[in-house]
Image (spheres, rainbow, N blue to C red):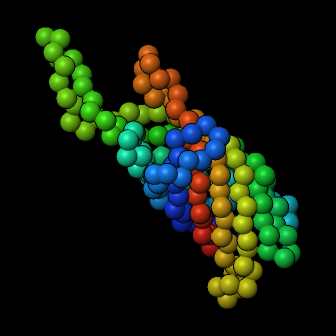
């Protein structure tokens, strides 16, 4: 199957390497995966992702990004992508009070502030492909871990911010 559609739920941990699971910072997303070769075992794949997450103490963000990688899929159903790498666009909404100076130099609170940022990421996926599900069309369940860097977070003071998100993804071929 050349294409897969996915839904995913996850946790967007503010961390460079090791995810912190307390408290939970929820996320939800959809994605489409394209397999670029015809090999059923050794697959070159690209995934396009649209997701949204809420980090209560920092920001909420809508992200659109892509990633490329290699996926190994065994005949027994085990599948792994040892390393995917990608990047894209972040529309961030700070969950902190944001102020901006007016013409007289007095600081005023900004209504619905937003920032446009970039994102780069890399990491593995591990999962299982249920070949007999959905009338033989398959169904896959994956756990995805990434190291992500978002920038420019705050001009002049915080150039980048790091995340270690975990996602559970359910995929169907189409």
Q: Residue furthest bottom?
A: 135
In the depicted structure, whether residue 46 falls above or below residue 172:
above
Q: To which quarter of the image does residue 58 belong?
A: top left
Query: Left of 116 or right of it: where is 171?
Result: right
Q: To which quarter of the image does residue 6 belong?
A: bottom right
Quadrant that contains the C terminus: bottom right
In the depicted structure, whether residue 11 falls above or below residue 85:
below
Instruction: Tell me where residue 47 appears, x and y as whole percent.
Output: 64, 54
Q: Residue at x 66, y 76 (%)?
A: 139
Instruction: Tell me where residue 136 appears, x and y as whole percent.
Output: 72, 85
Q: Nearer the viewer, residue 28 or 37?
A: 28
Query: Left of 112 or right of it: where is 4?
Result: right
In the depicted structure, whether residue 1 falls above or below residue 31:
below
Q: Nearer the viewer, residue 64 or 94?
A: 94
Instruction: Tell me where residue 90 appears, x and y as whole percent.
Output: 47, 40
Quadrant that contains the N terminus: bottom right
Q: Residue at x 47, y 54 (%)?
A: 24
Q: Residue at x 47, y 23 (%)?
A: 158
Q: Residue furthest front?
A: 22
Q: Residue furthest left?
A: 104
Q: Residue furthest top?
A: 104
Q: To which quarter of the image does residue 135 belong?
A: bottom right
Q: Residue at x 27, y 30 (%)?
A: 98
Instruction: Tell me where residue 148 appears, x and y as whole percent.
Output: 60, 40
Q: Looking at the image, can residue 27 be seen?
A: yes
Q: Nearer the viewer, residue 131 or 13?
A: 13
How many numbered discs? 0
Q: Looking at the image, can residue 29 be seen?
A: no
Query: Left of 145 or right of it: where is 35?
Result: right
């Amino acid at each position: 199957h050349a294409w897969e559609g996915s839904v995913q739920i996850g946790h967007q941990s503010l961390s460079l390497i090791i995810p912190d699971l307390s408290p939970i910072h929820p996320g939800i997303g959809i994605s489409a995966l394209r397999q670029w070769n015809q090999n059923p075992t050794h697959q070159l794949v690209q995934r396009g992702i649209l997701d949204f997450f809420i980090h209560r103490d920092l920001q909420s963000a809508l992200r659109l990004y892509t990633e490329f990688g290699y996926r190994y899929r065994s005949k027994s159903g085990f599948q792994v992508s040892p390393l995917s790498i990608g990047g894209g666009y972040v529309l961030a909404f700070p969950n902190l009070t944001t102020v901006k100076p007016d013409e007289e130099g007095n600081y005023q609170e900004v209504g619905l502030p937003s920032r446009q940022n970039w994102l780069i990421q890399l990491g593995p996926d591990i999962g299982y492909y249920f070949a007999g599900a959905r009338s033989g069309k398959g169904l896959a369940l994956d756990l995805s871990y990434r190291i992500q860097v978002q920038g420019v977070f705050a001009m002049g003071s915080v150039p980048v911010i790091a995340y270690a998100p975990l996602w559970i993804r359910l995929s169907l071929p189409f």
